[in-house]
Image: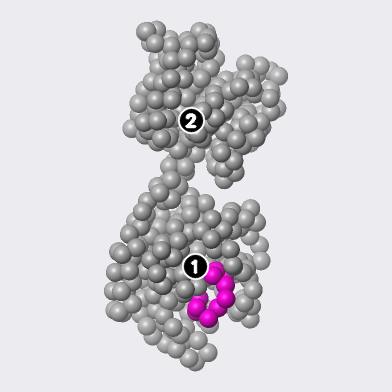
Amino acid sequence: MLKELTNKQIENEMDFFYKVKRTKPFVYNEGNKTDIIISVSSALQEKNNLAHLASRLLNKYYGYSILCNISKNNEDTSFKEKMAELCEKDKPIIVIDLTSLVNGKDSGDYAINLCTNLGRTLHDDTEMLEEVISSFKNYRINKINIDSPCQNQSFFAEWLAENYKQKAVQIELNKQYFSLSNKNIVKLVNAIHFLCQTLRQRDVVRSRHIDIKKLRKIDENFSSKDSLNDFEYVNGLPEIVLSAPHAKAGVFENKPKESESMSGSICKILYKEFGFSVIYKSRDNEEDYFNSKVNAYKNALFKNVLSPSTRLFLELHILSKTRVQDVTLFLPEEYDKDKLYQIINVLNSYGLQYFSINSVFDSFKKARTINQIKNKCFKMQICFNERLIEDNRKLRSVVDCVKDIIALFL
């Protein structure tokens, strides 16, 4: 992460723009990250160019591509033409347009103002807007305003969204707030970097193709062979923990259970593709995880896999096809309702509209892992009907659904 800057360093970075030969009305510095573009559409001023400074730091220290207006006015169209070219070529996840608030003294109640034209510049992607807000709050930039009258009613992000179907947000920076301390400038740059990292990671998870034939092969090998251990776990990315406690059959009410091998196979392939932390039952024996409040599987989960950094604990199951629901969700008594609504939207987007929440197996509520985890992460048990894994098309929907749910927490 970027550390504290001295006044001299800040002056040197600002000189970068003033010393550029004005052969063009803009500066384009291509970074090693082209899937997000940082722009400054407002003209270069004589002083207090906070937006230009932030863009320069994001390019120099984090490698983001930047496109900055350095003309004395906004009348030259070549800046927009260059942005249109970049959007066509790089197809960025988002364009983040930074601008310094002109009337800083009149805007002292907030540090930043997010201009989205009531969400339209983000294509009504409320999840992305929430991530923008939470990224700043993560760095204790809490004075955030949304869609107050922006400096220009026809602002740059709106132009991008309307003409090029490009997701964009204009972030107006209150110079009065950020000029109080160089540390605040560093916080600002790190917050934007954190936002970009999150959006890039989510995009990778959502867009990566999972080979269903490969998944079937993994499941064939997993279901036919037992491990030497009752369960296996791998500590990967701590933010996401996937669990499949019935991937190999146990005993339920003194009767052998049917194996749910595909739940374990999904854990295995998502670990291989993305490096998430996973734990799953790997040997068919008489130890029944479901009925045990304390056992080796849970001990390993609590002590070795879950961490303070965990944001999502997702326990996977396969329901018998005799069940009428496509999906059943179980949550603890207290949970983030906004996240649940987002999860429901994901289910609906894959046509999984026939689902229930905490509707069956209530007698085993206390034994549920989600009710025993102390971490302040989002905890959920999700059960997919066996019908959904019988053919490759439906199985792909299940895997993509799980990926999209995970992406909500990255």
On screen, residue 81 above or below 296: above
Q: Is residue 334 left or right of residue 372?
A: right
Q: Secondary structure at mark 1?
A: strand
User: Is residue 157 among the parts visible in the rendering?
Assistant: no
Q: Are marks 1 and 2 in contact (CB under 8 Å)?
A: no
| Between discs 1 and 2, the one toward the N terminus | 2
What are the residue bounds of the magenta stretch? 316-328
Q: Secondary structure at mark 2?
A: helix
- Viewer-side residue, 146 vs 349: 349
Tag 1: amino acid: Glu
> Which quadrant of the view contains residue 280?
bottom left
Residue 182 coordinates in the image, percent (x, y): 52, 24
**In the drawing, what numbered circle is on residue 315?**
1
Q: Residue 44 magenta-drawn?
A: no
Tag 2: amino acid: Tyr
**In the drawing, what numbered circle is on residue 164?**
2
User: Is residue 291 among the parts visible in the rendering?
Assistant: yes
Residue at (49, 92) in percent of width and height: 254
Residue at (38, 20) in percent of width and height: 28
- Viewer-side residue, 201 vs 324: 324
Residue 255 coordinates in the image, percent (x, y): 48, 91
Q: What residue occupies the far bottom of the structure in this picture?
A: 254
Q: Residue 325 magenta-drawn?
A: yes
* Image quarter in which the N terminus is found: top left
Residue at (40, 57) in percent of width and height: 276
Number of other residues with Cα within 10 Å of mark 2, as a class: few under 14, some 14 to 19, many 20 or more:
few
Of the residues tagged 1 and 2, which is closer to the observer?
A: 2
On screen, residue 366 above or below 129: below
